[in-house]
Amino acid sequence: MAIRKRHAPYLALPVIAGALLGGWLLTSHGNAVETAKAAQSKAPQDVDVALGTVALNDKQAGQFKVIAAEQHTFRTTKNAVGSIDFNQNMLVQAFTPNPGKIVDTFFNIGDEVKKGDALFTIDSPDLLQAESALLASSGVLELQTRTLARVKQLLKTGGGAQKDVDQATSDQQTAEGNYKAGRDAVRIFGKTDAEIDRIVADRKVDSILVVPSPISGRIIARNAAPGLYVQPGNAPAPYSLADLSTMWMVANVIEIDAPSYRIGQPVEVRVPAYPDEVFRGRVTTLGLNIDSSSHRQLVRSVIDDPQHELRAGMLATFTIETAAPQQSVGVPVDAIVREGDGTMTVWVTTDRHRFERRTVKTGLEQDGWRQILDGLAPGELVASTGAIFLSNKFANAVTG
């Protein structure tokens, strides 16, 4: 019994030590948890709902594009849909000036012609008659000229009278006038002086009348054919030509926009056939009335088309500047977020890491830029990409 009592204190020591160690471990673990919680509570939050800010780490910030709001030119424009047509002021129908039967034709639809080029020829009875009268007057003039010379010679030799000379002089002057009139009559048909001289010298008529092109342009319609009898002004015209350097853009704009249009306003026209090309011109005609059924007004513009790309009947859209351009603060369209309540917001930053949500008032949108009427000053930095991400992150924090 004495031996057991003597060893008892030594057996209790490990138990006491284990208890002390367990208590220390529990205390240390509790302190670590409290320290971690305290550190976490002191760490900055990435979303601050009260301030309306979102903070990004370096990796996230590197994926955002930030630009400065800047002054941008915005044009005040109106848009409408219309169609392309020939410039009717530069469209000409080529009629024959005299009746006759077509002998030859020289151009087809789509051909380019120069002013004065022969379009077709006709066998003209009127020209034949005019040339015949010219030859007759030429013969009479020769006769009267010889007669006058003869009576003058007789008067010198004493074998004639003065009255004969006077009568011969009068007859020769009349014949000369008739000859000049005959030349003018043939010249009306387009014959040159050289051609008229050749007709008189050869004593041979030529009834073929050449009908020239009145303008330089392109053949847009042809009704001429050899053997066809044509008369002046009888429709359809043998040829129709158009100067295609300019075309018409014809549109009917809504009634409420009618007061915005003025003669001379610049126009930009786009057609589906050339989606990347802009054709430019100016407003030349405004309708004097509003259509009672559609409540629209005619607006017609002359459009430059030096390469002859436009075709009559093409569907087209046009943009017309209705006021002077405005200088205003602008940001890319991607920098603006439309919120659920309809407000427009941008995310402004000073250090490219913390972004502040700001409501702005927007205006025109052109060429990928949006006009800012209120809420943003020139030079302020905004997120031009990732604005949707920031807005969603903020919204999630609010709803969470």
Image (tube, helix red, strand yellow):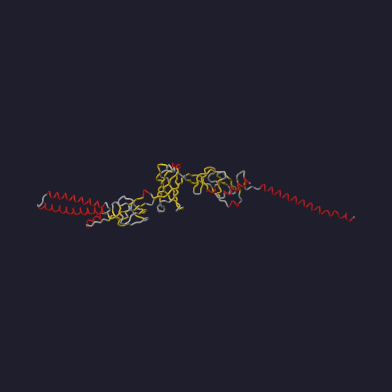
Q: Quadrant of the N terminus?
A: bottom right
The residue under the point 21% across, 50% down is 178
Describe residue 153's horizontal placement relative to residue 219 as left or right: left
Q: Nearer the viewer, residue 181 or 287?
A: 287
Residue 128 lies, in percent from the top left, at 25, 54
Q: Return the x and y of residue 9 as percentages of the image width and height.
A: 85, 53
Image mark count: 0
> Looking at this rendering, what residue extends furthest in the bottom direction?
202
Taking depth in this image into account, of 247 and 369 the one nearest to the observer is 247
Residue nearest the viewer, comparing 25 with 118 = 118
Q: Is residue 386 left or right of residue 158?
A: right
Lateral position of residue 145 relative to residue 17, left or right: left
Q: Percent from the top left, x then y, of residue 129? A: 24, 53
Q: Position of residue 80 (x, y in %)?
A: 45, 46
Which residue is at the front of the view, 286 or 331?
286
Q: Quadrant of residue 118?
A: bottom left
Residue lying at the far left of the rendered structure? 158
Residue at position x 88%, y 55% in the image: 4
